[in-house]
Image (tube, rainbow, N blue to C red):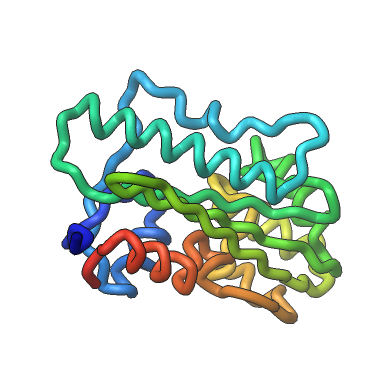
């Protein structure tokens, strides 16, 4: 039997970067965002002793299940659903989205002059199954002056971003080296995502 073909996916993410990256692939996508009755942020809570890779996989699959339920509850047409989650890890320490200015400064001070990992999991649910892929990249930061950190945080860029920075922002001037996937560091690894989309019969 010929697998069903799809000309669009639902994107269960508010991230403008993920929308841009899907556009870059040429994938038509429709938003499938949490409603006011959902506590989407609670899905990103960490667990004691949990490793970063296990954390990001668990959160991504939890987001996918919530999106599937949302799609059914809203009676939307059937199409694959795409979810992703990104975290930053320094050793065993998970550096998520900063709570406030002080937290953002603390995170960036930890990253200054060191190499950290950026781990992004992407999941795609089709009609019969869900698939998950994980991208792990390494990012080396130069030593950052305190005044530069303060200016960056004051500009508001760290908020809503794992590790308190975005690679496509002004923080790029601190990045001495990356190993891995630039798009994965942005929040959606295009190589892995394209493979999942092909397996699900998405046309792009």
Apparent side of residue 25 relative to residue 114 in the rendered image (left or right)? left
The answer to whether residue 21 is above or below residue 47 is below
The answer to whether residue 70 is above or below residue 169 is above
| Residue in front for this viewpoint, 59 or 153 | 59
Name the outermost residue toward the bottom: 177
Residue at horizontal 80 percent and vertical 74 percent from the top: 142
Q: Quadrant of residue 128?
A: top left
Residue at horizontal 19 percent and vertical 28 percent from the top: 74
| Residue in front for this viewpoint, 53 or 106 | 53
Locate residue 160, reporting x and y percent. 54, 45
Apparent side of residue 52 relative to residue 90 in the rendered image (left or right)? left
| Residue in front for this viewpoint, 201 or 170 | 201
Q: Quadrant of the C terminus?
A: bottom left
The answer to whether residue 154 is above or below residue 139 is above
Q: Quadrant of residue 91?
A: bottom right
Residue at horizontal 22 percent and vertical 51 percent from the top: 30
Residue at horizontal 56 percent and vertical 74 percent from the top: 182
Locate residue 11, reporting x and y percent. 32, 50
Q: Quadrant of the N terminus?
A: bottom left
Q: Quadrant of residue 178?
A: bottom right
The answer to whether residue 120 is above or below residue 137 is above
Name the outermost residue toward the top: 37
Q: Please state the total of marks drawn on the protein image.
A: 0
Locate residue 177, reporting x and y percent. 72, 80
Apparent side of residue 198 relative to residue 139 in the rendered image (left or right)? left
Locate residue 140, reporting x and y percent. 77, 73
């Amino acid at each position: 039997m010929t697998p069903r073909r799809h000309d669009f996916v639902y994107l269960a993410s508010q991230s403008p970067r993920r929308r841009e990256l899907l556009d870059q692939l040429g994938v038509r996508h429709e938003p499938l965002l949490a409603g006011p009755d959902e506590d989407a942020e609670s899905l990103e809570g960490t667990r004691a002793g949990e490793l970063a890779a296990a954390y990001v996989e668990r959160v991504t699959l939890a987001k996918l299940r919530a999106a599937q339920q949302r799609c059914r509850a809203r009676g939307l047409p059937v199409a694959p659903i795409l979810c992703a989650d990104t975290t930053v890890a320094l050793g065993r320490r998970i550096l998520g989205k900063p709570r406030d200015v002080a937290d953002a400064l603390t995170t960036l001070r930890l990253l200054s002059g060191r190499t950290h990992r950026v781990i992004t999991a992407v999941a795609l649910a089709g009609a019969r199954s869900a698939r998950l892929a994980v991208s792990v990249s390494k990012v080396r930061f130069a030593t950052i002056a305190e005044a530069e950190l303060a200016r960056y945080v004051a500009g508001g860029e760290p908020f809503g971003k794992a590790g308190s920075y975005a690679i496509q922002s002004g923080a790029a001037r601190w990045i001495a080296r990356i190993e891995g996937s630039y798009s994965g560091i942005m929040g959606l690894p295009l190589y892995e995502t394209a493979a999942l989309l092909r397996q699900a019969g998405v046309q792009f």
